[in-house]
Amino acid sequence: MKPKSKILIIAGSDSSGGAGIQADIKTVTALGGYAMTAVTAITSQNTTGVKSVVPIQPKEIEKQILFTSKDIKPDAIKIGMLHSSEVILSVVRALKKVKTKKIILDPVMVAKGGFKLINDKAIKTLREKLIRKVHLITPNIPEAEVLTKTKIKNLKDMIQAANILLELGVKNILVKGGHSNFKNIEDVFLNRKELKIFKNKKINTKNTHGTGCTLSSAITTFFACGKKLNKSCELGIKYVNQSIRSNLNYGKGHGPINHLSSIKVNRKFIK
């Protein structure tokens, strides 16, 4: 099988392999893409939480993006954790030179265990300098609350937050409903022409580490392969739900999801 698309991932690492750039590479590969990376930070973490974050210098992040893209032009770019204003501005500068239109931003702000991964100044820079330059933004409910300075308690609030992001200049928004306490998870997709609600039953498990990173990478891969954006969101959500259902139960905290859920391995490799 040859890769169907080339994806550049700009994100932080997760030493436990469940989230961050490790989850992104697994997802892109599992869905038939070729993954390239620009690492923004190195984290020491496991399923119970984040121990430390070591940032990569903004100039080095910019070099990774430009040098990689100069040789292998990405069909799409997925952006994850950007921990400072300086890093965000360096990524914005690099994106101007790369000129890839299919850019998807997962505005990672807080790790699953509650560890804050981005400061207030960086959030302001993200709102003012980056979000209108990407094709899709995929905030969860807490991230959408921070970006819109509103409280989200129900589906109506999610739609309202998406509309605020639209007014801030974002072209397409997917507000993820996984943090809600309802039996069904509702994800809101919105642009100037369309409102679509993706409704799925909530899977009862604590093992959901890396779902946000995985979803945005899945959407990026489907989108890069030529699927329409709303269909890419639908397929990405299906892939994540399928991966959650495996319930790997690795580690003592919020375990990872199964990125191999889409792969059937040839028997000759596992004898």
Image: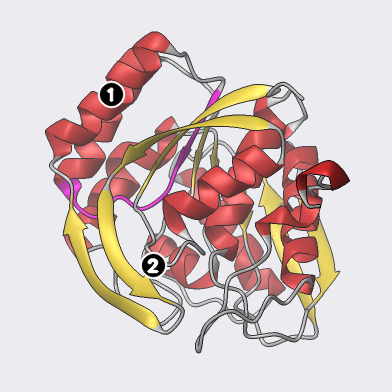
Q: Residue beneath label 2, please?
A: 146
Q: Nearer the viewer, residue 204 or 145?
A: 204
Which residue lies at the image location 68% right of the left edge and 63% below the top edge? 258
- Specify whether 192 is left or right of 137: right
Q: Nearer the viewer, residue 161 or 114?
A: 114
Q: Nearer the viewer, residue 199 or 27?
A: 27
- Mark 2 or mark 1: whose residue is earlier in sequence: 1
Q: Secondary structure at mark 1?
A: helix
Q: CA distance from mark 2 to mark 1?
A: 26 Å
Q: Position of residue 40 (x, y in %)?
A: 27, 46
Quadrant position of the N terminus in the picture:
top right
| Viewer-side label of 2, 1 | 1
The residue carrying pointer 1 sits among few (fewer than 14), some (14 to 19) or many (20 or more) residues within 10 Å by Cα, namely some
Which residue lies at the image location 50% right of the left edge and 89% below the top edge? 252
User: Which range of residues does the magenta coloring cover?
Assistant: 76-85
Is 237 placed above or below 4 here? Answer: below
Q: Residue beneath label 1, please?
A: 94
Q: Position of residue 17 (x, y in %)?
A: 47, 61
User: Is 264 within the magenta?
Assistant: no
The residue carrying pointer 2 sits among few (fewer than 14), some (14 to 19) or many (20 or more) residues within 10 Å by Cα, namely some
Q: Which quarter of the figure has residue 58? A: top left
Asked which colour scheme the image uses, the reply is secondary structure
